[in-house]
């Protein structure tokens, strides 16, 4: 939920604060940051956990290798 008393985060702001709560009970507090950065960081956070799973489909590892190759080829 957004803290509506804050003017620097939430619906009418370009920035937000995030608190991630994981199924194992861990809590990860992120600092105030631009919403675009929140989105990128969240995607990376999810990707890291999906790739760490031992029961993941083989296609997840393949997709990451293809993406990394494209990034490497651009440089």
Image: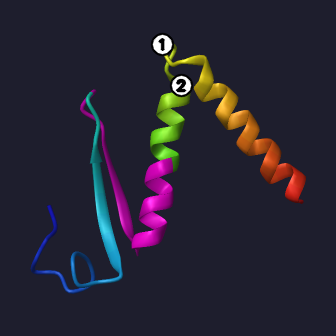
Which numbered dot is residue 52? 2
In the image, residue 66 sits, relative to residue 60, either above or below, namely below
Pair 1/2: label in front:
1
Q: CA distance from mark 1 to mark 2?
A: 9 Å
Q: Which residue range is magenta in the image? A: 24-43
Where residue 23 appears, x then y in whole percent? 26, 29
Q: Quadrant of residue 33?
A: bottom left
- Residue located at (17% from left, 81% from top): 6
- Residue located at (43% from left, 61% from top): 39
In the image, residue 2 sits, relative to residue 58, either above or below, namely below
Which numbered dot is residue 17? none
Where residue 31 appears, x then y in whole percent? 38, 66
* SS of the residue under disc 2: helix
Residue at the top extreme of this rendering: 55
- Residue located at (52% from left, 48% from top): 44
Task: Indicate the quadrant containing the N terminus: top left, top right, bottom left or bottom right.
Answer: bottom left
**Mark 1, other Cα within 10 Å: few <14 / some 14–19 / many ≥20:** few
Which numbered dot is residue 55? 1
Q: Identify which residue, 3 or 53, lies in the foreground.
A: 53
């Amino acid at each position: 939920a957004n803290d509506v008393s804050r003017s620097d985060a939430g619906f009418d702001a370009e920035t937000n604060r995030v608190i991630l709560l994981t199924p194992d009970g861990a809590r990860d507090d992120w600092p105030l940051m631009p919403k675009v950065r929140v989105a990128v960081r969240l995607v990376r956070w999810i990707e890291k956990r999906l790739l760490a799973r031992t029961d993941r489909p083989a296609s997840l590892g393949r997709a990451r290798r293809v993406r990394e190759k494209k990034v490497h080829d651009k440089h």
